Image: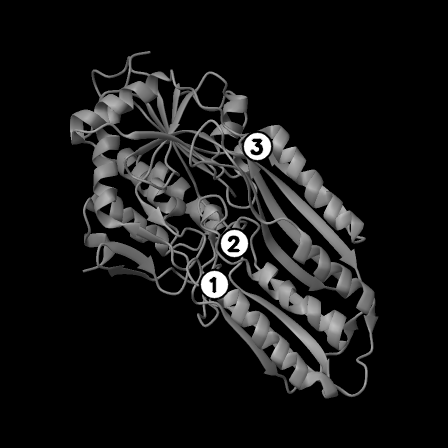
Amino acid sequence: MTIADLNPKRVWKHFYTLTQIPRPSGHEEKIKAFMKKFGEDLGLETIVDEAGNVIIRKPATPGMEGCAGIILQSHLDMVPQKNNDKVHDFEKDPIEPRIVGEWVYATGTTLGADNGLGIAATMAVLEANDLAHGPVEGLFTAEEETGMTGARALKGGLLKGDILVNLDSEDEGELYVGCAGGLDGSFEFSYTQEAVPGNMAPYSLNITGLKGGHSGLEIHLYRGNANKVITRLLLPLLTKYGVRVASITGGSLRNAIPREAFAKILIPKEQIKAVEAEVKAITAVAKAELSIADPDLQVALVADSDVPPFVIDAPTALAAVRAVFAAFNGVYRMSDSMPGLVETSSNLGIVASKEGKIAIICLIRSSVDSAKDELAQVLGATFELAGASVEFAGGYAGWKPNMDSPILKEMKKVYKNLYGVEPEVKAIHAGLECGILGGNYPHWDMISCGPTLRSPHSPDERALIPTVEKWWNFLVEVLKNAPKR
């Protein structure tokens, strides 16, 4: 059996097609062209705007012309993350889905169910001629994962609908009515390249085996952050044993908890045994601390055969390591108004040395704007004191819950009629595009729902098969019961 044979087949067949189309953030040309052709082949009005958002309009079925227009919204891109031993080019290679029990995984990479299942469900609605619905628009936004670029650039007046149903949340049976806003922090050190000192041996320090995950949905699980782990190890090596750093890199996305980090270092030959003992001791402590949240942490100190061409000047390397080690990472504050909801967090997502610069990038999230600004000041002060340049950009608004939302009331009623229980109504710490989209369309009534996914933004990403059918049947009934204008 392949995923195209799963129920509901009309959704899974489209999702399988999407897995065969490379669509990492920033490289979405193929998926945009595919979606444009999909809409046009159905004879539906299809628009690709200047930002690369794709809009496909489908008229109401007979007798439902007076219903409010519903916009089904998903994003086109996917997070490109893979295991270190997996050979995969996200710009060229298809995803390899596999079924494991009740779950669909990819093979060594992210699956792209975030947000491919939302796209697939919308495609199924647009294609179907046996569903009852009012006017429907499929809105497929560009570059959501790297800064919500498409949502930011969407012009007001382009969409005609009244209700936005975002299909990007990840727990079936839950309806989301609010989300956190975000802010990107960029910190940069400039370094001088120095000749490799004599009597030193080249080594690699490798952090692997961490789970990683979505920095909004899973930040509260207190998983290991590879950038924090590697600087915890490097700090005593630099200060106590005269180790020099040639390069350091960790993480690849600001919104994914970094799973791996690597440093090329030079160890004074007379200190090799002491360094090995220090690394072993710190590793034992870190593994004990993460034994529940992240039990597969691996730390390797490996002798290299090649001597790097230079080392980073010692003061800058130490300043950068100290700053990353000191910088706040994780849950900053829990919500007072919604128990169990993370209010404010920071993910220290990327550290990379290249061409005379050490760049550190983090993503701050909060449902309270003042708290987001406070944490930005905390991080900014940390890096400024260490001598880095500081820049904050890409801020986007959160989505304030509206508990009197008409579509919320209707969807709660539909869900209870279908399944005998009311769905949970929640806000989410992850960033959804609703807050941004609502800025240009303030009249929209908005809600978010989706099937159950786990570990998005990591190679452990998976979709729970039975929930896709439940979610699809619910979506069909919501369209059938669309409120009147």
Colouring used for the render: one colour
Is residue 132 visible in the rendered image? The answer is no
Q: Is residue 187 above or below residue 415?
A: below
Residue 153, numbered circle:
3
Which mark's residue is nearer the viewer, 3 or 2? 2
Check disc 1 and give the amino acid type.
Leu
**Disc 2 + disc 1, Cβ < 8 Å:** yes
The crowd level at tag 2 (other Cα within 10 Å; few <14, some 14-19, many 20+) is: many
**Marks 3/2: CA distance?**
27 Å
> Does 55 sit left or right of 130 as displayed?
right
Give x and y (percent) for residue 100.
25, 61
Nearer the N terminus, badge 2 or badge 1? 1
As helix, strand or loop, the secondary structure at mark 2 comes to strand
User: How far is the residue under mark 2 from the one under mark 1?
Assistant: 9 Å
What is the three-letter code of the residue carrying label 2? Ile
Q: Position of residue 135 (x, y in %)?
A: 32, 22
Q: Which residue is mark 2?
A: 257
Assign the N terminus to one quadrant of the image: bottom left
Name the image quarter holding residue 122.
top left
Displayed quadrant of residue 351? bottom right
Q: Which mark is residue 210?
A: 1
